[in-house]
């Protein structure tokens, strides 16, 4: 029997910053482009994401940029750091990739970079990944998330056909963080203020009178409220696993490295807890 070919290493994409735009006080848009994106595509899922590669401070990598070579030749602490961002828009004709960054001043890695990014700056990234797009056979749609899920929810709403039934809840810090979404679905904007992230979302979904028929749901954001809504939807409302895209994009008190290291165990524990509960009839 012939040996199975080895898995080909994923190669990063190269792009340049074309322009930036401040959308709201805490949301910065960066548009990437260039001829090197000719082999890139992100038009099958509305939650497509890419992983931007940030060089370790003070480290120069060999050219051409090769992640496999870097992993083989550099100690782990000198590998590029990755940060994950949803594709807000992909324009294949002009080869423009739009990413929106939540920013908190100088806090974090990607946010400050997005604020300082200048046209012509080089960027390397992996991807895209993604798994969700609104199911056209569903009777209605439920989309729920905080700022981190806003780009994916906006893209999903814009992909819905005219007249599609949907309920969308997006929690932001305040009214100044609301954005224009090109959709006829009326978005319920929830203003967090000084409250805990996700509490308003949990209350809104719990209070929602669910329409008749099969729902296709997308619920993403901070892990704590996602856990609560997973229980509400899977156990109390009986939404099947196949009709639910749900995940913690981030976790309060953890950076992406720490959260990704523990995310699988966190999700497995929640699944085990909820599999032991009795779903609604």
Image (tube, rainbow, N blue to C red):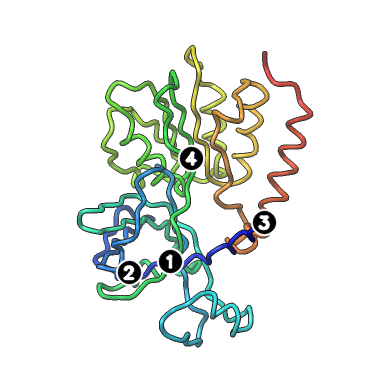
Q: Which residue is mark 2?
A: 15
The single residue placed furthest to the front in the displayed view is 1
Quarter of the C terminus within the rendering: top right
**Which residue is rendered at x = 61% and y = 20% of the image?**
237
- Between circles 3 and 4, the one closer to the viewer is 3
50 with respect to 40 (left or right): right
- Between circles 2 and 4, the one closer to the viewer is 2
Q: Is residue 10 above or below residue 173?
A: below
Please tell me the numbered disc located at residue 1: 3
| Residue 254 image position (x, y, % from top left) | 62, 59
Q: Secondary structure at mark 3?
A: loop
| Callout 1 crowding tier (Cα within 10 Å): few <14, some 14–19, many ≥20 | some
| Residue 218 image position (x, y, % from top left) | 49, 35
Whether the residues at callouts 2 and 4 have beta carbons within 8 Å, the answer is no
Mark 4 to mark 1 CA distance (whole Å): 25 Å
Mark 2 to mark 1 CA distance (whole Å): 8 Å
**Which residue is rendered at x = 41% and y = 71% of the image?**
124
71 with respect to 162 (left or right): right
Foreground residue among 193 and 264: 264
- First-in-chain label (2 vs 3): 3
- First-in-chain label (3 vs 4): 3
Whether the residues at callouts 4 and 1 have beta carbons within 8 Å, the answer is no
Please tell me the numbered disc located at residue 125: 1
- First-in-chain label (2 vs 4): 2
Please tell me the numbered disc located at residue 145: 4
- Between circles 1 and 3, the one closer to the viewer is 3
Q: Secondary structure at mark 1?
A: strand
Mark 2 to mark 4 CA distance (whole Å): 29 Å
């Amino acid at each position: 029997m012939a040996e199975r070919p080895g898995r080909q290493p994923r190669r990063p994409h190269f792009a340049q910053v074309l322009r930036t735009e401040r959308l709201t006080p805490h949301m910065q848009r960066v548009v990437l482009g260039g001829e090197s994106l000719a082999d890139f595509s992100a038009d099958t899922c509305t939650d497509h994401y890419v992983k931007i590669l940030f060089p370790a401070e003070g480290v120069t990598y060999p050219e051409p940029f090769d992640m496999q070579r870097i992993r083989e030749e550099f100690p782990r602490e000198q590998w590029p750091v990755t940060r994950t961002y949803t594709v807000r828009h992909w324009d294949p004709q002009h080869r423009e990739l739009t990413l929106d960054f939540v920013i908190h001043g100088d806090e974090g890695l990607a946010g400050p970079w997005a604020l300082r990014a200048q046209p012509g700056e080089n960027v390397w990234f992996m991807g895209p990944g993604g798994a969700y797009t609104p199911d056209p056979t569903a009777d209605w749609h439920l989309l729920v998330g905080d700022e981190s899920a806003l780009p994916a929810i906006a893209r999903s709403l814009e992909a819905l056909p005219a007249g599609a039934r949907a309920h969308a809840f997006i929690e932001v810090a305040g009214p100044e963080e609301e954005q224009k979404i090109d959709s006829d679905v009326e978005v319920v904007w929830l203003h967090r203020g000084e409250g805990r992230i996700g509490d308003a979302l949990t209350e809104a979904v719990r209070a929602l009178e669910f329409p008749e028929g099969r729902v296709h749901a997308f619920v993403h954001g901070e892990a704590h409220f996602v856990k609560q809504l997973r229980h509400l939807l899977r156990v109390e409302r009986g939404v099947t696993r196949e009709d639910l895209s749900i995940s913690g994009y981030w976790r309060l008190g953890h950076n992406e490295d720490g959260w990704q290291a523990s995310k699988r165990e966190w999700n497995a524990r929640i699944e085990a807890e909820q599999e032991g509960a009795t779903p609604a009839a």
